[in-house]
Image (spheres, rainbow, N blue to C red):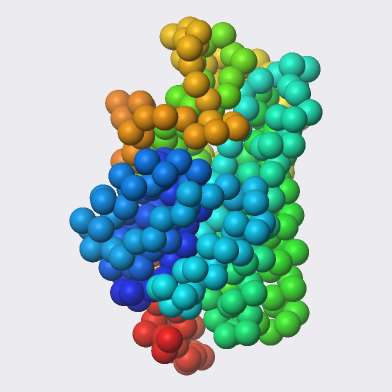
Amino acid sequence: MISLGQRGDVVVITGASAGLGRAIANRFATNGARLAITARGRERLEQAKVELEALGAEVLVFSEDVADADAMERIAETVERELGPIDIWINNAMVSVFSPIKQMEPAEYRRVTEVTYLGYVYGTLAALRRMLPRNRGVIIHVGSALAHRSIPLQSAYCAAKHAVMGFHESLLSELIHDGSAVRTTIVQMPALNTPQFDWVKTRLPNSPQPLPPVFQPEIGADAVFFAAYHDVGRELLVGWPTVKVVEGNKIVAAYIDRKLARDGYKGQQGKQPVSADRQDNLWKPASGAWSAHGRFDDIARPKSLLLRLVLKLNLFGETIERVIRPRGRTIGDGAQR
């Protein structure tokens, strides 16, 4: 672990009952955070709560849908009443559909947009209503390399992540204009070993899988934790694959179009046919005792050397800045509540 944040910070994490959200919650729990975790499925939330409390966190759980703006407001109000002022709000909840565009239904596009994009908007609005009057706090959007470069078979998800990026850039500019001390950033993820590939809605003949290389979700969780306590700028690219996709798309987008047309269909499918009784989580939670990891432990990379280098360089830059231009304390640096 590269850094430690402020113990006892109040942190809200959406989509935290499994997958990357669960890994992020675990990371903050090891630092003694007071956590509010949200998801639709109550049973898995309660399982996560037990795990997080064992790691030292105080935990509230909210069985709510991020597509409900009023629910996000209720969560924020309850958190502030029971845990204290929200220090960090992490937008992470998502759904997706693996399908060719020609087979997609309008309702599926609407649902993915409501969760994966508008869920971030609603969460951000609830956080801003509390953070702006105090002039402090951090809002983190969990993004993806697919916010810069879309791929076949995930058009709804890719479009939603592009929308999140556009929303984030507008928010960032407005905070700078207002001279606000509230900080926001987006953490762009590579392919991660999470359970989403076992519950995502799919029309593919074989079981969905992430385009390799694949990383363990703890890599993404470490990046989010670092971004919460260090000013990483407008976005943090996690791992070399993300950097390669983002920068490569600026230079050779047409080549990537053709490469994805050739390899993107097969690369996102495993060898096992999709089960006839497969359930998905588009409209309701998928049952099962899912945790942070998916079924790709055998190929998932446990660390990213590039990410560690980037974070260390960021720390070095902060040290130089403090020497040149001392500044007041902020979240994670002993801030007064």
**For this rendering, which residue is in front, 149 or 96?**
96
Hey, which quadrant is residue 205 in on the image?
top right
Q: Residue at x 48, y 12 (%)?
A: 277
Residue farthest to the left?
54
Looking at the image, residue 139 sits to the left or right of residue 157; the answer is left
Q: Residue at x 58, y 73 (%)?
A: 183
Count of numbered tags:
0
- Above or below — where is 52 with respect to 35? above
- Spot occupied by residue 332 in the image (x, y as percentages of width and height): 40, 77
Q: Residue at x 58, y 24 (%)?
A: 201
- Spot occupied by residue 33 in the image (x, y as percentages of width and height): 34, 68
Hey, which quadrant is residue 5 in on the image?
bottom left
Looking at the image, residue 181 sits to the left or right of residue 3; the answer is right
Please say whether residue 74 is visible from this viewpoint.
yes
Looking at the image, residue 231 sits to the left or right of residue 149; the answer is left
Q: Quadrant of the N terminus?
A: bottom left
**For this rendering, which residue is in front, 278 or 310?**
278
Q: Residue at x 72, y 57 (%)?
A: 167
- Spot occupied by residue 334 in the image (x, y as percentages of width and height): 37, 85
Q: Quadrant of the C terminus?
A: bottom left
